[in-house]
Amino acid sequence: MRELISVELVPLTHREVEITDMKSVKTAFTRHRPDVVINTAAYVRVDDCETEQDKAFSVNALGARNVAVVCQEFGAKLVHISTDYVFGGESEPRTAPYTEFDFPIPPNVYGKSKLAGENLVRHLCSKHFIIRSSGLFGVAGASGKGGNFVETMLRLAKERDELRVVNDQIFSPTYTKDLAEKIAQLIHTEYYGIFHITNKGACSWYEFSKEILNLAGIRTPVIPITSDQYPQKAKRPHFSVLDNYHLRLLEMNDMRPWQEALKDYLKEKGHIK
Ligand SMILES: NC(=O)c1ccc[n+]([C@@H]2O[C@H](COP(=O)([O-])OP(=O)(O)OC[C@H]3O[C@@H](n4cnc5c(N)ncnc54)[C@H](OP(=O)(O)O)[C@@H]3O)[C@@H](O)[C@H]2O)c1
């Protein structure tokens, strides 16, 4: 996170800390004595979580618990990264963005395990910031998913005659750089609690794909399809738009529109000038 440049940053990989192992977490804390911990570690393969429920809960719930317990012991602030997929499991269709004060009903095992992690963090670490975001794209890419959606669309658009993308799952795409900048502001405060942090606006994956190709000047046709036409193991929410309500109440919600953030990302990656 280059946005956290004003503080000394110690990035740890899975090779250096195993969050499901309390001893490993304690060893890392003893070595680095952090004032703030940003826990981005998670089991993120949403479909695999359906068949690997034990792994999902071990990492996303108990791993989060371990980090929270040790943060509390060392008096560190904890930034815990969570997801829009804690929402969208209700039977009634939803059209209003979810605030931090809405009751989460996760639609799948991944969302349930992330919500369990959030609850453990809330109860076990007093200085917590639980950050829910969605549809992340960033220069580093998600290791567990092999890159990110933007890069996948750009690659497929070059390989295929047309792309078929779901048009009935609405969310807010978010640039990790913007998210990191907001986290960098929050960690200097004592505004503990849950925060929704996404770029402004919302779209379907189809609309997101259209904008990616449009900005990149690629003319491959994009065909809208329904979730039923693209069956996946884990149920996805039809609507999981997050309202940055907590930030708004604090007059800290200056997140820019996702289209602007996407353009910036494409520039940073060298896809456009
Ligand atoms: N990508 C999105 O659109 C999105 C949206 C909302 C929220 N999030 C949240 O953002 C965070 C980062 O996710 P990401 O999508 O960027 O995926 P990612 O790049 O795969 O990040 C997850 C990291 O956690 C590590 N990890 C997994 N199990 C671990 C363990 N037991 N101990 C220590 N490290 C472990 C992984 O390492 P290995 O790969 O080596 O196992 C990986 O580096 C997660 O909390 C996720 O829930 C992501």
Image (tube, helix red, strand yellow):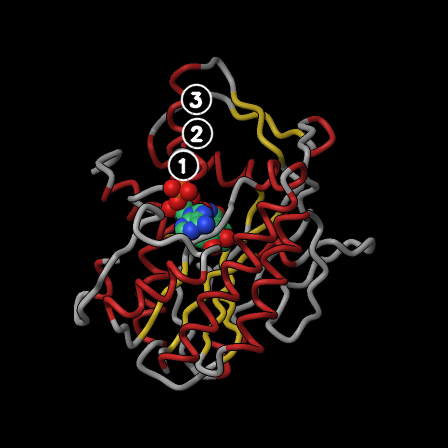
Identify the amino acid type marked 1. Val
Do we see residue 232 in this rendering?
A: yes
Q: Position of residue 56 (x, y in %)?
A: 59, 48
Q: What amino acid type should be assigned to the residue bearing mark 2?
A: Met
How packed mark 2 is, by other alpha carbons closer than 10 Å (few <14, some 14-19, many 20 or more), is some
Residue under pointer 2 = 153
Quadrant (top left, top right, bottom left, bottom right) of the C terminus: top left
Could you say which is closer to the camera, residue 269 or residue 236?
A: 236
Q: Residue at x 28, y 70 (%)?
A: 30
Label 3 crowd bin: few (<14), some (14–19), many (20+), radius 10 Å:
few
CB contact under 8 Å: marks 3 and 2: yes
Residue 237 appears left or right of 260: right
- Relative to 215, say whether 120 is above or below: below
Judge: label 1 CB < 8 Å from ligand 1: no
Indicate the quadrant where residue 250 lies.
bottom left
Q: Residue at label 1?
A: 150
Give the class, few, some or many, for how many residues have Cα within 10 Å of label 1's Cα (few <14, many ≥20).
Answer: many
Q: Is residue 20 above or below residue 158?
A: below
Instruction: Give the Cα separation between the discs numbered 3 and 2.
Output: 5 Å
Seen in the picture, residue 82 relative to 149 is either above or below; the reply is below
In the drawing, does residue 264 fall left or right of residue 72? Answer: left
